[in-house]
Image: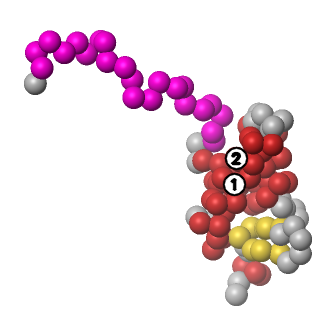
Amino acid sequence: LNSTWDQSAAEPIRPKEPRRGIPPQGVAGAALDILKEATQPLTIAEIVEMLGECFGYDLTTVAERQRYHTAVNNGLMNIYRQDIVEHPGSPTRWSWRTDDDAD
């Protein structure tokens, strides 16, 4: 151990402030909540737009919109895939799985 080390002089490892506005259950969880309340199947872009309205996200740049699009898509595909239904067509639309949708 170094007896001359000054803890107050140490630089933080992650000096940037964390992003604000993330829902408590994450972006994918919020997207699933939107699908549960939707009356018709939605595209990922429509879900992102609704997330922006609900949580005040700045979606004015393509990069920010793409970041949320990727987060929603990956979350739905990797975490909640068994809870949603894929509807054919382009673009793909998604809905909450109900008892009527059982395989």
Amino acid at circle 1: Thr
Judge whether residue 79 is colored magenta. Answer: no
Q: Quadrant of residue 51?
A: top right
Question: Residue 76, how many percent across, how many down?
Answer: 66, 63
Visible residue check, residue 54: no
Verify CB contact (< 8 Å) between mark 1 and mark 2. Answer: yes
Cα distance, mark 1 to mark 2? 5 Å
Is 84 positioned to the left or the right of 41 in the image? left
Question: Residue 39, how many percent across, how many down?
Answer: 87, 62
Query: Which colour assignment does the render follow?
Result: secondary structure
User: Residue at 65% of width from left, 48% of height from top?
Assistant: 27
Is 90 positioned to the left or the right of 66 in the image? right
User: Residue at 64% of width from left, 70% of height from top?
Assistant: 81
Quadrant where the C terminus is found in the figure? bottom right
Quadrant where the N terminus is found in the figure? top left
Q: Along the line of sight, which residue is nearer the eye, 34 or 15?
A: 15
User: Residue at 31% of width from left, 12% of height from top?
Assistant: 9
In the image, the segment drawn in magenta is 2-23
Amino acid at circle 2: Arg
Circle 2 sits in a helix, a strand or a loop, which is it?
helix
Q: Which residue is mark 1?
A: 70
Q: Which mark is residue 67?
A: 2
Is 23 positioned to the left or the right of 64 in the image? left
Identify whether 72 is placed above or below 49: below
